[in-house]
Amino acid sequence: MAISCCNPSFQPPTGFTAPVIVMKDTAINTNPYPLVCSIPLPNGFTRLKADSNSFAFWLKNVHLKKDKQVHLYDGSLKENQTAQFAVLDMPVGNKDLQQCADAVMHLRAQYLFDNKRFNEISFTDNEGGIYKFDQPYTIEHFNKYLEKVYGMCGTASLSKELKSKKIEDIQQGDVLIRGGFPGHAVIVMDVAVNTTGKKIYLLAQSYMPAQEIHILNNPQENTLSPWYEVNDNDDIVTPEYWFKRNELKQW
């Protein structure tokens, strides 16, 4: 059984503004952007450059589904359809396994797999047990490996693996994470900056039950959404969870 890593009873902080309810209309639920890097930027911002072999570059070029609705692992629709801006075109599997930290690990492992860096695919559970991806290096074996990782690792273990960093230094591939039972984790998919040095970023998550990974709306700044701004606020409020600014980590 997967380690439940997300808190289903979200209690927002003071000042939280609920996102606008998305009606089940075909036009509203169609995403026109094919890639993460196709999502429009606010005026005056440019995306951070990334080496073509880097995790940052890979994340920016993840394909997005045309359907904006988030589906659960069993094919049904997620009850809350207000959190997402777009849905990543990546499999969720048919088991209740790929939840929050699992989605982060999936993206990291998929990048390494796609670049044939098989020996670097490794995760550690909360007791220090190491799970390495070994031969055969097939997609079928890779998917079975991920299921094992999902079942044994979670926010608590991943939080120990990652290294803390300042929010001002945010980059693609960084992770906002609160380790625990439950906890939560979201991944930074893209970052942009303007001429004054102000940074904005995109976040993606899975949640519970296991569901498709999706780009998050910004529930507190509708005019900036789906981008989030690096500012002086202590809280980083997402549609279904909130983090503290000191909870950013890197691989």
Image (cartoon, helix red, strand yellow):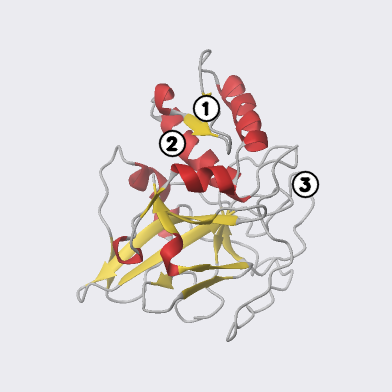
Dot label at residue 4? none
Which comes sooner in the sequence, label 1 or label 3? 3
- Residue found at x 62% / y 56%: 183
Mark before the other along the chain sequence, 1 or 2? 2
Check disc 2 and give the amino acid type: Tyr
**Does residue 154 sit above or below 68 in this rendering?**
above
The CA span between labels 1 and 3 is 32 Å
Q: Quadrant of residue 51?
A: top left
Tell whether 62 sits left or right of 155: left
Crowding around mark 3 (Cα neighbors within 10 Å: few <14, some 14 to 19, many 20+) is few
Tell me: 130 left or right of 39. right
**Amino acid type, label 1:** Ile
> Residue drawn 64% across and 80% down?
18
Q: What numbered label is drawn on residue 75?
A: 3
Q: Position of residue 175 (x, y in %)?
A: 45, 54
Circle 1 crowding by C-alpha within 10 Å: few under 14, some 14–19, many from 20: some
What is the number of the mark on residue 111? 2
Disc 2 or disc 3, which is closer to the eye? 2
Three-letter amino acid code of the residue under disc 3: Gly
Q: Quadrant of residue 241?
A: bottom right
Query: The residue tagged with tag 1: helix, strand or loop?
Result: strand
Residue 89 seen anywhere in this rendered image of the structure: no
Q: Label 1 belongs to which residue?
A: 130
Q: Residue at x 20, y 76 (%)?
A: 196
